[in-house]
Image (spheres, grey):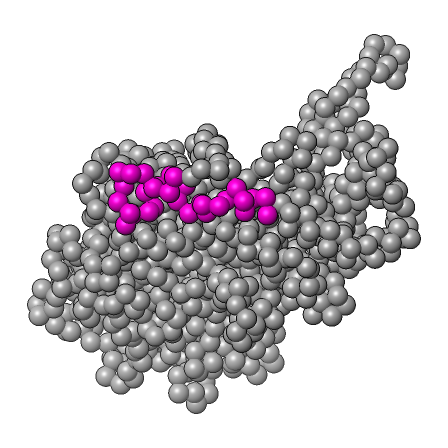
Amino acid sequence: MVGNDVSRTKITIGVCVMEKKVKCGSEAFSGPMLQILERLQAFGEFDIVHFGDKVILEEPIERWPICDCLIAFYSTGYPLKKAEAYAALRKPFLVNELGDQHLLHDRRRVYERLEMFGITVPRYALVNRESPNQELDYFVEEEDFVEVHGKRFWKPFVEKPIHGDDHSIMIYYPSSAGGGMKELFRKVGNRSSEFHPDVRRVRREGSYIYEEFMPTGGTDVKVYTVGPEYAHAEARKSPVVDGVVMRNPDGKEVRYPVLLTPIEKEMAREVCIAFRQAVCGFDLLRCEGRSYVCDVNGWSFVKNSYKYYDDAACVLRKMFLDAKAPHLSSTIPPILPWKVNEPAQPSDGLTRQGSGIIGTFGQSEELRCVIAIIRHGDRTPKQKVKLEVTEEKLLNLMLKYNEGRPRAETKLKTAVQLQDLLDATRILVPRSRPDQESDSEAEDSEHAEKLRQVKAVLEEGGHFSGIYRKVQLKPLKWAKVAKANGEGEDEKPTKALMILKYGGVLTHAGRKQAEELGRYFRNNMYPGEGTGLLRLHSTYRHDLKIYSSDEGRVQMSAAAFAKGLLDLEGQLTPILVSLVSKDSSMLDGLENASSEMVEAKARLNEIITSENKTVQSSDLPEEKPWMVDGCGVPLNSSELLQELVKLTKKVTEQVRLLAKDENEELAGKTSYDVIPPYDQAKALGKTSMDVDRIAAGLPCGSEGFLLMLARWRKLARGLYNERKERFDITQIPDVYDSCKYDLLHNGHLNVEGLYELFKVAQLLADGVIPNEYGINPKQKLKIGSKIARRLLGKILIDLRNTREEALSIAELKSSQDENAEVFSIAREDTDNQSKSQSKLEHAAKGSLNSEKSIDLEDDDDKEPKYRLDPKYANVRTPERHVRTRLYFTSESHIHSLMNVLRYCNMDESLQGEPSLVCDSTLDRLCRTKELDYISYIVLRLFENTEVALEDPKRFRVEMTFSRGADLSPLEENDREASSWHQEHTLAVNGPERLQEAGSYLTLERMEKMMRPFAMPAEDFPPPTIPQGFSGYFSKSAAVLERLVNLWPFNRNNSSQANGK
């Protein structure tokens, strides 16, 4: 047998694969298989024999060429069982075992094998059907989850066909994110997925795997092994984001090499051994600090990487020699035989850029970090309806969803729950309306009006989305009733309080504002003149994390911003689920400062309603008006308040007249009208205004005249209590909010008195809103530090981690420069270089200080990270790295953070320190008052690479802010303002300085000024060298030569089936 002929000087390698997998054409850059085979042949130790399709498909195995080593793997049309028979007959050394390749066609068996070897997979369950649409007693589907054998999977979850060759994979999204389904498929042109907003039910025609959706930051990792000891990883944009395939100028999908952690390298080794496939590709998901294998593909090679081809050829060479010629030396020659003719690889890099907005401090200054805190975009007014209910249908509904507990409150959020409430409300709403002027029926009329309002809200948009509607039912009174069996008594609720919260939905203008701001950031906040960020991001040198509060409008603003920032396409729901992380503890809530805010509002009420006002304390200089209690409150506020009440009543009456026709139309309809078709944009914010509704003289958006009237009527009643003759100044921001909304979106209705009301409300709101967060600087600082305490702590972590990373890379670079003349090209692959490379990896990855949670018990790294592998990257500056952290929140956190930044020096521990914000900006902020929709604060950290590492001036912080959406279209009549007004949107102001031009704020001082108001120092984990990304597999000749025991199941033993 040829395999036993020791006298042969060359080993025969048989290539028994379909011809399309070798790509023997005349391409300038041929297929990976051909590239590697040519390198193997260049060693002069191997003869390569291509079987060809005709032989494989038509010839009997006895006539197939005889070889020592066999490369054989399945692809479409390949006779795998025939190849198995050949291997049993000739017993060559197999690179990939053939029998185990059958496993790869069944996802169930793949997951079973992975679990058998202890390899982490996503949480999953199997649904096996023997026939299409077979009903299974262990499978339950509800609106937002499926349950398999008692194991529940909440949306978003993934649905995979059991057949490995079926690539139609579905992701189902929760109703709280808008619902819908994304279908993933093999790339077609530049598409790899499609979003279907109306599909909400899972497939039932076959057998499927259901598994937990893993948020990976919009990135997939593909790992390629060549034997158990070698693994190469590449990252690409995940198809779950927008389904658009990123391609280079040659039409190839853009992928970049990334570093594997030690744990991931061990996983690669285990996958290789588990499936007995030396050359093997598999998909890796990184989620919350852990890695999971979600698919194993079998034979796969990296495309378009000369360095990888070199490595693969060297590893395969050693594998073949160990198996068939162990007496021959497998030492790699100093210069690889094909190196002489290797074409040069293209390289492109980024030019150095300075600060951009404020001005550069020299071309040696590099941007290292961008931190932005951004308020959500334009929204509909937030609304609340409260009514006491005694109707049995509503009380029974409460008991149905609180497990029959008569004293427990119930929250209704899901579609099924809200549909039950709507059905009950439709029956209870009277078909005709009594004369609302009749005093005797006033109470019943108000109750019926509120029920009608509840019904209208529930019908709005035609589909229930928990992202902006929720109902609470709280029992108020109870009665004793006899038990059904006559033994004893039960308690039963007889009255309950119903609270419906709705509105606050991102409008088409809000979505447009957020998306355009994302584009502005892409073009202006990063180096590279507009393309710089996309280049950094696509090459995994941009570490992006986006956080949002729990509010739907905030989440959608974050998703729209990400779409503009990263130049994505398609619907917001997949972008939201893939890229945005919710952190309500950091970005939601006012509970920590509730008592201080109550105190501030009480004092504010005194100032506004008082006839006599003190503009300034006698001991304060006139040039610092922001130091006065109630700064910004108009001197004639008490008169303005009375005018506000009068104009609010006038506008409410005008809206009532507009709603009269709609009321008459509603009265003639039955209580079971068909729900209008679902329109996702009504819940999530459209990209354009409702042209058809506007043309028909209806309000913009999904709000009808009935709800518009209810909104204004509630404001008119709440602003002034005529019986108690008392003003409620907390209603002023709501009146102002409604005025702005109707002027912008319902200007075409020509509501008389609305503009006059807006001007009065604006004057009062400019005094009320900033002072709700503190009546003077010291109180603003106290309230701000309590509300933004956790956010401030996280910002300090971001800045600290960036600094440690930059210093690690700088130290590494300095070390490399010192050794540059010592190591020649000929000695690149020596053991010393290997040690130097190990030091590089250790230092560079030491920069990856984990994004620590501030809670002590949660000190693990929970954010997936993707680091460019510099050994394989075709970029000029692989060490360049920018961290971006985006925090989307509400008005309270923007005001709170701004108050801490400008007044932090008033803390006792910082006496004598100047403010972080210059006086001119303090004065401008005092006059600005409103931080409107899409307002933001940006901190950018720069490193001056020409300054000594220990010098405090090494790192500079630049602070800017924007007032957000510009109100000028509502206040001016020029052509530009008219254009904006016609589009029902407002422009967003550009950034303004918080520091004097040319000033230099060091990171050290920034930390000193902010730390007293952030989470306590003892809660911050000390800087450590993380375990993750401690290096990638070293490619030196010395390490390759140490690849012993490559195949524990393929040792050179003639008794084995493969003849080794």
Q: Quadrant of residue 228?
A: bottom left
Report whether residue 960 is seen. Answer: yes
Residue 470, magenta (yes or no) = no
Question: As drawn, is 326 to the left or to the right of 978?
Answer: left
- Please give the name of the residue rendered at 77% of the width and 68% of the height, measured from the top-left corner: 696
Closer to us: 541 or 556: 556
Which quadrant: the N terminus? bottom left
Q: Quadrant of residue 31?
A: bottom left
Closer to us: 385 or 840: 385
Residue 850 % position (x, y) = 33, 47
Closer to us: 182 or 554: 554
Which quadrant: the C terminus? bottom left
- Please give the name of the residue rendered at 83% of the width and 31% of the height, measured from the top-left corner: 391
- Please give the name of the residue rendered at 60% of the width and 62% of the height, measured from the top-left corner: 744
Q: Quadrant of residue 536?
A: bottom left
What stretch of residues is rendered in magenta?
Answer: 614-643
Question: As drawn, is 509 to the left or to the right of 450?
Answer: left
- Please give the name of the residue rendered at 25% of the width and 80% of the height, measured from the top-left corner: 339
